[in-house]
Image (cartoon, helix red, strand yellow):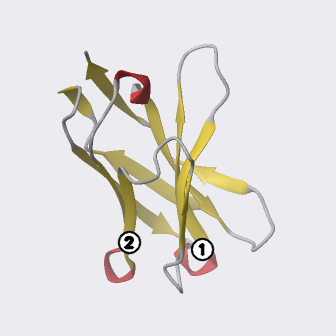
Amino acid sequence: QVQLVESGGGLVQAGGSLRLSCAASGRTFSTIRMGWFRQTPGKERKFVAAISWSASSTRYADSVKGRFIISRDNAKNTVYLQMNGLKPEDTAVYYCAVQAADYGPWDSWGQGTQVTVSS
């Protein structure tokens, strides 16, 4: 099991920026990808961004492409989400997750960090 701790959330005005961090510990040797998801009350958790742990290839949801940047520091077992040009619709609880198999599920999750964007 991988333990994940997110940090960096907060309240920002529209157009502002935040950088989220996710520190991983435990069985990190099994990590294939790490990613970010977000969820608002009453809605499904949605994919935001992901990065390959070994190759650093990335992918993004269309809604954040060009505004958010995912990165990672393997030595620190940490993944980041730089969020720029924030919009009110970005308001959500952001979760870090680990994918331990190439075609497997996102099976480890952090506790989440709240991001609130005011208009």
User: Element type at marker 2?
Assistant: strand
Left or right: 29 with respect to 21? right
Q: Residue at the spot x=62%, y=54% of the render?
A: 108
Q: Label 2, on which residue?
A: 72
Label 1: how many residues lie within 10 Å, few (<14), some (14-19) or many (20+)?
Answer: many
Looking at the image, residue 117 sits to the left or right of residue 13; the answer is right
Residue 39 visible in this rendered orientation of the protein: yes
Residue drawn where x is 52% and y is 41% of the image? 63
Residue nearest the viewer, comparing 118 with 30: 118
Point 56% across, 47% down: residue: 62
Q: Position of residue 48 (x, y in %)?
A: 53, 47
Compared with 10, 24 (above or below) is below
- Residue 31's disc is 1
Question: Residue 79 occupies which quadrant of the picture?
Answer: bottom left
Q: Earlier in the sequence, mark 2 or mark 1?
A: 1
Q: Position of residue 42 (x, y in %)?
A: 63, 13
On the image, the x and y values in percent for residue 111 come to 47, 39
State the residue at coordinates (47%, 52%): 65
Q: Amino acid at mark 1?
A: Thr
Q: Work out whether 30 lies above or below 110.
A: below
User: Which callout, 2 or 1, points to the residue nearer the camera?
Assistant: 2
Q: Which quadrant of the rendered structure holds the C terminus?
A: top left
Task: Name the residue furthest right.
Answer: 103
Residue 111 visible in this rendered orientation of the protein: no
Instruction: Identify the secondary structure beneath mark 1.
Output: loop
Q: Looking at the image, is 59 positioned above or below residue 49? A: below
The crowding category of the residue bearing disc 2, from other C-alpha atoms within 10 Å (few below 14, some 14 to 19, many at least 20), is: many
Q: Mark 2 near mark 1, Cβ–Cβ under 8 Å?
A: no
Q: Quadrant of residue 89?
A: top left
- What amino acid type is highlighted by mark number 2? Arg
